[in-house]
């Protein structure tokens, strides 16, 4: 069947396709969108989606697929869009990617499939991410979401710890294989970073909830408010009859800088700031009960996606200024280019090659300023990036009443502490086999950020898929 | 959904609740707490597990009305439900036979110290309790504390009951009387805990305090609950809630607990909220 679809393309047509311009994506105007939390990109219309799908030359040896961490059959789903079979396209995506509506929005396509797309050699690459988002949204918005049939029950039950993208993938795959699945989630809602970290304007929470609801309909049992290690330990779960356990507890421990003044009122970790705003809906305070300090002058420290999310969230809480303090230059910013661009449009002030050295407070312990130093780039370090070095005597102060520290997260030690027979590395990340997710403890698998440190949604999902396959095998043969 | 199976008013603006949460009831140990969220719009607030009944599958909490969430909770009664209850959180109190333990409870801290007194007595300690309240009507759990102690000293700020004065003066008297005290556990308002720690410091008596910073998740994910102990940052929800009272930076804790004074006032006044993200505090931003 595949062959039919990727029939040789007429060379003339191929050339024509490669010259077609990329379909632009409508966006909320920057001036408007900083006043709301609605999604920024508006999404393709069906006509635009078909037009964009026509730019794909249906490569026989598609480079994009090799660039996709989970190997989605990209030309095939694009072909289905081209033919107007949007729902089929979504189902095709779901064969390899459990959460296409999420990935279409948050995957760094420019570093993966779109980076290597052949059309991108001379023109802009096919907008694979936008097409993925389109197909998944179309299916959901048209009430066409199908609940896949579960296989005949195997009578075996397994536990998943953590309801982030890794855990949700394992849950979906295992329930489809006929096992009975319980997800234990520490927070009051599953979704992990998708729910508490990534802001509404980038990933509407109703999309994540819809995916979770779908899994529940397939029979996954969600036990929220369940902190594994505190309520039950892994051993107790096993004793309770769970024949295998997947740990997808994420990288949830925020790092601080250990500089003076870090505990002043107004200094937040990005996790706290984003959790208050996203999960607890502090942007709707006092309609929602959880407050957040809005601040007139906000400083965000860091340069990753999390920093960009925190900065763009702060911009929406009507401050006078929001500045990003990052110790390297613009080229080294680890955040996605698209997010940097969006942040720029929304008025983020980039203080590049700067580093905070202390926070300054008033007599009530409230933050009033941050002292920074200027930096310059020296020799490359281990990561190959040029090492930032302090310029002596370059101290200056930036006025601010809110500072958000976004310099990365470590592994939450709760599970390793209560299950010492699960081996971890020196940073506390669980050692899981990259191909199977197997840990040092029989029957226990792990994947996603708890293994990788801070990575991406799609890698977490890829880990989940591999772990589910390996877990299914283990349930059959009992071999470790 | 977690059902309230019993509610009792203990004093002015202080109520006791039993909540159906069998999994937590089975697991919890002295010194641990829960985080609850009343409804979809609710804030997550931490409350100590005062007692549990494994058979009935309930946990007991004692709540003082201080702000929006605690007041809404105290309006609830038997048969009402709470949307989310997560726990048991925090490290359990380290219990062993120390010899003589002094348990100091001030205000609502009396409820928090109760399960620790019970456990210490169970481990064979001589438990001397000192409980302070502003006046007789605000004294809570007197019977329960009496039962959990070898001896109970009550103090009231106005002298309406028991010893007239503060818990610290009774503690000082005990020390000066030459009682051998192996450990002091003090739980109550921050100024009280600080004062107790200052009383015991010159004598080198080990003193534990249970800290009550503002929390969000209660699982170590956000850092809202961080306090400085012995010059190091600690997350109270996972590293605590109990710490060495001689090492805690109480001043910082007091300040940090005032982070949202303005917002707390607004929450109580239920200021009208405008659509979108238009500011509740500054109308000038749109
Ligand atoms: C602000 C932010 C923005 C990001 N933006 C992007 C992006 O644009 N694109 C991208 O690809 N990646 C992005 N990432 C990274 C991405 O979100 C993560 O790599 C991914 O979510 C990891 O998935 P996970 O399932 O391993 O863990 P998580 O998503 O962290 O989920 C772990 C879950 O486990 C739960 N848990 C933890 N401990 C326990 C326990 N003891 N018992 C029960 N449950 C527990 C947690 O509450 C949580 O729900 C971003 C991350 C952040 C923080
Ligand atoms: C580990 C732990 C155990 C606790 N156990 C109990 C308990 O058993 N019974 C009980 O009544 N309370 C307990 N508290 C305190 C309780 O969590 C707060 O009273 C509650 O969060 C106030 O919420 P609110 O919305 O009603 O008030 P808010 O409007 O949020 O605050 C009202 C006032 O209370 C103060 N406040 C806010 N948060 C806290 C806090 N976390 N601790 C102390 N004061 C605070 C503020 O300074 C403010 O002025 C505990 C706190 C912690 C961290
Ligand atoms: S590499 Fe580009 S053109 Fe080729 S199949 Fe993939 S998306 Fe289509
Ligand atoms: S409450 Fe979030 S880390 Fe302690």
Image (tube, coloured by chain):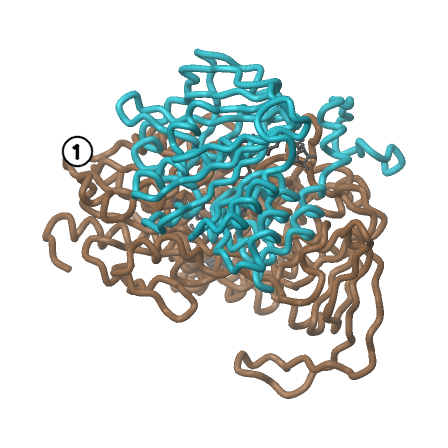
Tint of chain B? cyan
Q: Is residue A71 above or below residue B187?
A: below
Query: Which residue is located at x 74 percent, y 36 percent?
Result: B261
Query: Which percent across, then down, holds residue B278?
Result: 79, 33
Q: Position of residue B240 (x, y in %)?
A: 48, 50
State whether residue A391 is above or below residue B252.
below
Quadrant in the picture for the C terminus of chain A: bottom left
Specify whether residue A149 is in view: yes
Whether B217 is drawn above or below A474: the answer is: above
Q: Is residue A48 visible?
A: no
Q: Nearer the viewer, residue A102 or B44?
A: B44
Q: Chain of mark 1?
A: A
Tell me which residue sits at (56%, 81%) in the image: A384
Viewer-nearest residue: A2 or B106 = B106
Report which quarter residue B169 is drawn in.
top right
Is disc 1's CB within 8 Å of ligand 1? no
Q: In this rendering, would A343 be left or right of A212? A: right
Q: Is residue A239 left or right of residue A183?
A: left
Q: Nearer the viewer, residue A51 or A302?
A: A302
Q: Is residue A213 left or right of residue A441?
A: right
Residue B24, given in percent of the width and then of the height, sits at 35, 33
Outermost residue toward the bottom in this view: A379
Chain in brown (letter): A
Classify B79 as above or below A8.
above
User: Which residue has dot 1 on it?
Assistant: A153
Is disc 1 placed on a helix, strand or loop? loop
A225 or A382: nearer the viewer = A225
């Amino acid at each position: 069947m595949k062959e039919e679809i990727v029939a040789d393309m007429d060379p003339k047509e191929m050339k024509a396709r490669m010259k077609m311009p990329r379909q632009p994506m409508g966006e909320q105007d920057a001036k408007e969108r900083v006043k709301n939390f609605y999604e920024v990109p508006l999404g393709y219309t069906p006509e635009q989606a078909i037009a964009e799908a026509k730019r794909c030359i249906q490569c026989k040896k598609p480079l994009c697929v090799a660039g996709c961490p989970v190997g989605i059959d990209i030309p095939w789903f694009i072909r289905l869009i081209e033919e107007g079979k949007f729902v089929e396209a979504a189902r095709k995506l779901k064969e390899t990617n459990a959460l296409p509506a999420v990935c279409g929005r948050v995957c760094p396509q420019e570093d993966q499939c779109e980076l290597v797309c052949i059309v991108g050699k001379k023109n802009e690459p096919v907008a694979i991410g936008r097409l993925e988002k389109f197909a998944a949204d179309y299916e959901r918005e048209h009430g066409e979401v199908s609940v896949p049939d579960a296989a005949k029950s195997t009578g075996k039950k397994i536990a998943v710890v953590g309801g982030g993208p890794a855990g949700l993938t394992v849950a979906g795959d295992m329930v489809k294989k006929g096992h009975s699945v319980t997800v234990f989630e520490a927070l009051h809602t599953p979704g992990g970073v998708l729910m508490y970290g990534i802001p509404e304007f980038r990933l509407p929470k109703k999309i994540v909830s819809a995916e979770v609801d779908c899994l529940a309909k397939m029979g996954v049992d969600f036990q929220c408010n369940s902190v594994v290690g505190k309520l039950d330990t892994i051993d107790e779960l096993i004793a309770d009859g769970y024949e295998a356990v997947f740990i997808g507890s994420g990288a949830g421990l925020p790092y601080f800088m250990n500089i003076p003044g870090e505990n002043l009122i107004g200094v937040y970790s990005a996790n706290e700031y984003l959790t208050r705003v996203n999960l607890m809906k502090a942007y709707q305070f006092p309609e929602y009960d959880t407050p957040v300090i809005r601040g007139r002058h906000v400083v965000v420290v860091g340069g990753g996606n999390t920093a960009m999310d925190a900065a763009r969230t702060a911009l929406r809480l009507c401050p006078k200024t929001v500045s990003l303090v990052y110790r390297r230059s613009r080229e080294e910013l680890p955040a996605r280019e698209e997010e940097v661009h969006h942040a720029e449009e929304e008025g983020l002030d980039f203080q590049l090659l700067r580093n905070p050295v202390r926070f300054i407070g008033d007599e009530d312990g409230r933050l009033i300023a941050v002292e920074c130093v200027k930096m310059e780039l020296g020799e490359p370090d281990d990561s190959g990036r040029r090492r930032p070095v302090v310029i002596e005597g370059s101290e200056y102060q930036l006025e601010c009443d809110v500072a958000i520290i976004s310099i990365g997260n470590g592994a939450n030690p709760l599970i390793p502490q209560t299950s010492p027979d699960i081996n971890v590395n020196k940073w506390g990340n669980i050692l899981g086999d990259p191909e199977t997710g197997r840990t040092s403890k029989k029957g226990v698998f792990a994947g996603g950020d708890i293994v990788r440190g801070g990575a991406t949604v799609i890698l977490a999902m890829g880990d989940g898929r591999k772990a589910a396959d390996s877990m299914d095998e283990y349930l059959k043969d009992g071999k470790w | 959904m977690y059902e309230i199976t019993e509610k009792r008013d203990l004093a002015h603006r202080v109520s006791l609740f039993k909540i159906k949460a069998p999994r937590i009831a089975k697991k919890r140990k002295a010194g641990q707490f829960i985080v609850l969220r009343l409804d979809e719009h609710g804030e997550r607030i931490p409350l100590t597990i005062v007692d549990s009944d494994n058979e009935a599958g309930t946990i007991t909490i004692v709540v003082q009305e201080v702000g929006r969430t605690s007041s809404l909770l105290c309006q609830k009664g038997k048969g009402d439900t709470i949307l989310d209850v997560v726990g048991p959180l925090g490290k359990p109190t380290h219990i062993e036979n120390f010899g003589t333990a002094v348990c100091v409870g001030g205000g609502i801290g009396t409820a928090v110290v109760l399960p620790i007194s019970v456990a210490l007595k169970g481990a064979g300690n001589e438990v001397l309790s000192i409980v302070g309240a502003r006046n007789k009507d605000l004294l809570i759990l007197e019977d329960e504390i009496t039962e959990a102690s070898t001896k109970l000293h009550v103090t009231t700020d106005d002298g309406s009951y028991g010893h007239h004065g503060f818990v610290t003066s009774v503690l000082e008297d005990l020390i000066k009387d030459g009682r051998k005290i192996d450990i002091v556990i003090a739980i109550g308002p921050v100024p009280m805990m600080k004062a107790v720690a200052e009383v015991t410091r010159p004598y080198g008596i080990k003193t534990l305090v249970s800290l009550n910073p503002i929390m969000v998740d209660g699982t170590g994910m956000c850092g809202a609950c961080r306090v400085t102990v012995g010059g190091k940052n600690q997350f109270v929800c996972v590293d605590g809630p109990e710490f060495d009272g001689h090492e805690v930076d109480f001043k910082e804790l007091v300040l940090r607990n005032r982070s949202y004074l303005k917002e707390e006032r607004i929450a109580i006044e239920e200021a009208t909220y405008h659509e979108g993200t238009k500011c509740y505090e500054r109308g000038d931003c749109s």
